[in-house]
Amino acid sequence: MRILAALMALACTGFGQAQEVAVLKYRGGGDWYANPTALPNLIRFCNAEIGTHLETAAGTVAADSPDIFRFPFLHMTGHGNVLFSEQEAANIRTYLLGGGFLHIDDNYGMAEYLLEELPKIFPDKQLQEIGADHPIFKEPYDFPEGLPKIHEHDGKRPQAFGYFHQGRLVLLFTVEADLGDGWEEPEVHNDPEEVRQKALQMGANIVNYAFKN
């Protein structure tokens, strides 16, 4: 509980001191390590453009590790299978209910597996689609149509889903957007700079929401 209380205090401090964010490592065979330059680039963008004070090196933490409570913000991505044990799900649930935030970005092919595992984390909650009027799409950058489309795969619209606790969005699941691809180094996907900026700005909105709510 001492660790949990520390996380809650840290998450409420806003951008006042240097803080760490991390990639969530999960089991099941999916490539949790996909997009290795994405989170570091997002960190640099947030520090430069919206006044965050994030450690430039992103951490890595396993889903069942007590170290999860060191990080007010976690990012998870990949293309394939995801598997949470009951212990891992309980650890993530305690983390989220205690003030943590998890952003899951489907890098294409992850959603079908994840949708089977997320109810282990919140068996008593329903995954909700997040409308374009939610504050996460408004500050500091305005996305009037909601989640932006960064990469095309199946011709489907981008969607944002989430779990809420006491009115606060604690887990954000972005699908058919591929934000992380847009955060990567320019030469990885050869995206136009306009597309990269859109992805980074949406990422900054997510970080901003996570630290201020």
Image (cartoon, rainbow, N blue to C red):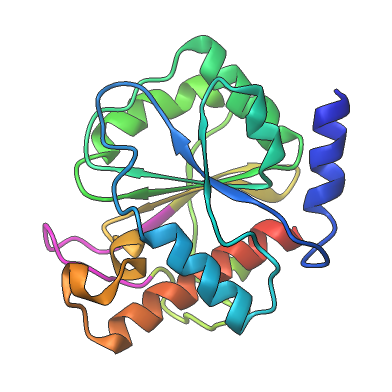
Q: Nearer the viewer, residue 149 or 102?
A: 102
Count every numbered label the image shows and give the total. Answer: 0
The residue most toward the bottom is 194
104 on left or right of 54: left
Q: Quadrant of the C terminus?
A: bottom right
**Picture quarter containing residue 117?**
top left
Q: Nearer the viewer, residue 7 or 148?
A: 7
At 43% across and 19% down in the image, what residue appears? 84
Q: In this rendering, is residue 67 above or below 50?
A: above
Answer whether residue 155 is magenta in the image: yes
At 71% across and 59% down in the image, what residue appears? 211
Residue 144, how many percent across, how many down?
Answer: 47, 82
At 60% across and 63% down in the image, what residue appears? 207
Q: In this rendering, is residue 164 above or below 90?
A: below
At 49% across and 64% down in the image, what residue appears? 131
Q: Nearer the viewer, residue 178 or 124?
A: 178
Q: Which residues are magenta?
A: 148-160
Residue 81, how many percent across, how many down?
Answer: 25, 28
Residue 47, how many percent across, how many down?
Answer: 62, 74
166 on left or right of 1: left
- What main secondary structure does the magenta stretch of the protein show? loop
**Picture quarter containing residue 66?**
top right
91 on left or right of 186: right
Residue 118 visible in this rendered orientation of the protein: yes
Q: In this rendering, is residue 19 above or below 98?
A: below
Q: Nearer the viewer, residue 47 or 26?
A: 47
